[in-house]
Amino acid sequence: MSTVRRHTPPGRGARPAALPGRRRLLLVPLVVGALLTGACARPAADDGASRSGAAGAVALAWPDEGQASVAVEGIGSLGTKGRQTPVPIASVTKVMTAYVLLKEHPLKGGSTGPGIVADQQAADEAFSAVESAAPVLAGHTYTQRELLEIMMVSSANNVARLLARWDAGGQEAFVDKMNRTAAELGMADTTYTGVSGIESDTRSTADDQMKLARAAMKDPAFRAIVAMPAVTPPGGVRIPNTNKLLGRDGVIGLKTGSSTPAGGNLVWAATQNIAGTPRLVIGVVLGQRAGRAPVEGSAAARDASRALIASVRDGLPDAVTRAAGPDR
């Protein structure tokens, strides 16, 4: 059977930020107000939570290029790195594709959703040599959940377009929904031009993708899908999740993306017990090794994310404890 293939389009990436030393630790104030920008569109994860108690400093291992952002449920932003200029995001685009589909066709209580018949176009595109794809069988009925799993876990562009045709009749109409949803979430620096991320003019920032990730992770179906270690399409072979950090250091998602113009990108989510309370930590890393081979960018995004996760796990619990004080 066909296996997943990766697209390597030509193009130039975002300019790296001139900061020396990938592993250099920077003292970053715990800026809990950063997530209040665009508060009308901010997900309610932090509503009612105290933000002032952790006002200390956390040493974060920011990447030395591109953009990054980290936030903690119930605490707020741990800061951002890099100029928040819109850059290509590759298959991170599929986070919005899945979010829109689940908003319009919710999967509640373990539902698998309606049946969707795979068309010949999706089956033919599975054999593409120029983009990421996964095998689907023309005429076979898949559940909505099955197709979302294939799209998100294996990063299948052909399945993303199939879902767009099913929902909106075509990719262009579905992209309109994506951009309207981005506006609703306050993602002012984001433009979607396709549903898969193969288009290099789909652009966003780490801050904007943080807003989307926080909203998407509130959906139990989305959260369960991005945590899957692998997917096996009916009649196909087992395809591992493209997120190689999954299952380590509390990582439970979320989405990878790489191309030559975009470099390596990774939106990750991890759980961590902080002061006796389980917290969801979300990070966005964009523009790693942009302009180089996607495999190099992917590895760089993974390394940068791993360093950020480690620094959060090492530093945040102590910072919260110190901020709470001895009498609390």
Image (cartoon, rainbow, N blue to C red):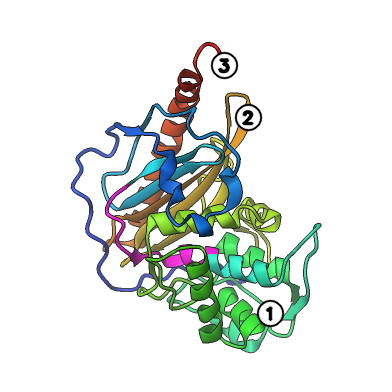
Please report the residue visible at 44 percent of the width from the left and 61 percent of the height from the top: 257
Tell me the element at label 3.
Answer: loop
Tell me the element at label 2.
Answer: strand
Is residue 256 visible from the viewing direction of this image?
yes
Q: Which mark is residue 265?
A: none
Q: Earlier in the sequence, mark 1 or mark 3?
A: 1
Q: Is residue 304 above or below residue 323?
A: below
Q: Earlier in the sequence, mark 2 or mark 1?
A: 1
Quarter in which the C terminus is drawn: top right
Q: Residues within 10 Å of mark 3 (few under 14, many from 20)?
A: few
Q: Which mark is residue 277?
A: 2
Q: Amino acid at mark 3?
A: Arg
Please report the residue visible at 81 percent of the width from the left and 57 percent of the height from the top: 109
Residue 59 falls left or right of residue 118: left
Q: Amino acid at mark 2?
A: Thr
Residue 135's quadrant in the figure?
Answer: bottom right
